[in-house]
């Protein structure tokens, strides 16, 4: 259960609030929503929080668009989540929905998501076999007869947030 911290001694002081926000940003890159939540928990007034957030945006210390682009690249490189899994991560970080849609639409194609899914399957010990049939590239991950294994694999990919077309391409 979330318990807000006791209010600071200076909830009306913009300079103190700004220093706190810069301190938070020095620890790691954060979204506007994350900084807002932390500052509210610290007991700063709405007026002071708005003033500080505006100043941070003007100084380019807070930029949700840039944050989302960097976060997406890191997730694609170092983690194994699909489109919906990444979208969920963005929502947890309190990135505005319009930025989520723009960044995911532009930065995560089905081909990239398929490569991420392949990487996940290889890491988990599945063998990926590619066969070319006329126009379409087909993937085979295991013996065609094992429907239990197909269902298990499809559910695994689904739980990591991969789109249906990626799962269909790799599993069926």
Image: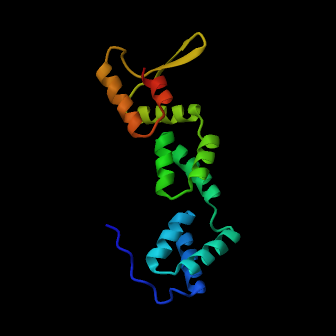
The number of discs equals 0
Q: Which residue is at a point 50% across and 36% down the rendered structure image?
A: 116
Residue extending furthest toward the front? 47
Residue at far top of view:
134
- Residue, x 48% and y 69% (percent of image)? 37
Q: Residue furthest right?
A: 58
Q: Which residue is depicted at the point 50% across and 89% down?
A: 10
Give how far across and how far down residue 104 sits, in percent. Answer: 59, 44
The answer to whether residue 124 is left or right of residue 39 is left
Residue 50: percent from the left, percent from the top? 60, 75
**Color scheme of the displayed model:** rainbow
Q: Quadrant of the N terminus?
A: bottom left
Residue in view at x 38 percent, y 29 percent:
154
Q: Position of residue 75 (x, y in %)?
A: 52, 47
Q: Evaluate whether residue 30 shows in this view.
A: no
* Corner quadrant of residue 56: bottom right
Vertical position of residue 91 compared to residue 41: above or below: above
- The answer to whether 26 is drawn above or below residue 130 in the figure is below
Q: Which x, y percent locates residue 49?
A: 56, 76
Q: Please give left or right for residue 114 compared with residue 120 in the image.
A: right
Q: Quadrant of residue 145?
A: top left
State the quadrant of the C terminus: top left
Q: Is residue 157 above or below residue 27?
A: above
Q: Residue furthest left?
A: 148
Residue 69 in sight: yes
């Amino acid at each position: 259960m979330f318990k807000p911290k006791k209010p600071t001694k200076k909830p009306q002081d913009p300079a103190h609030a700004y220093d706190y926000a810069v301190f938070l940003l020095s620890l790691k890159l954060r979204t506007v929503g994350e900084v807002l939540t932390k500052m509210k928990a610290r007991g700063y007034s709405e007026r002071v929080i708005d003033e500080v957030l505006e100043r941070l945006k003007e100084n380019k210390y807070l930029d949700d668009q840039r944050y989302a682009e960097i976060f997406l690249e890191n997730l694609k490189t170092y983690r194994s989540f699909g489109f919906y899994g990444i979208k969920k991560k963005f929502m947890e970080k309190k990135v505005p929905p319009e930025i989520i849609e723009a960044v995911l639409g532009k930065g995560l194609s089905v081909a990239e998501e398929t490569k991420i899914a392949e990487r996940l399957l290889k890491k988990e010990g599945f063998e990926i076999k590619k066969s070319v049939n006329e126009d379409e590239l087909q993937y085979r991950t295991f013996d065609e007869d094992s429907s239990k294994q197909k269902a298990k694999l499809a559910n695994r990919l689904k739980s990591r947030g991969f789109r249906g077309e990626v799962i269909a391409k790799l599993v069926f």
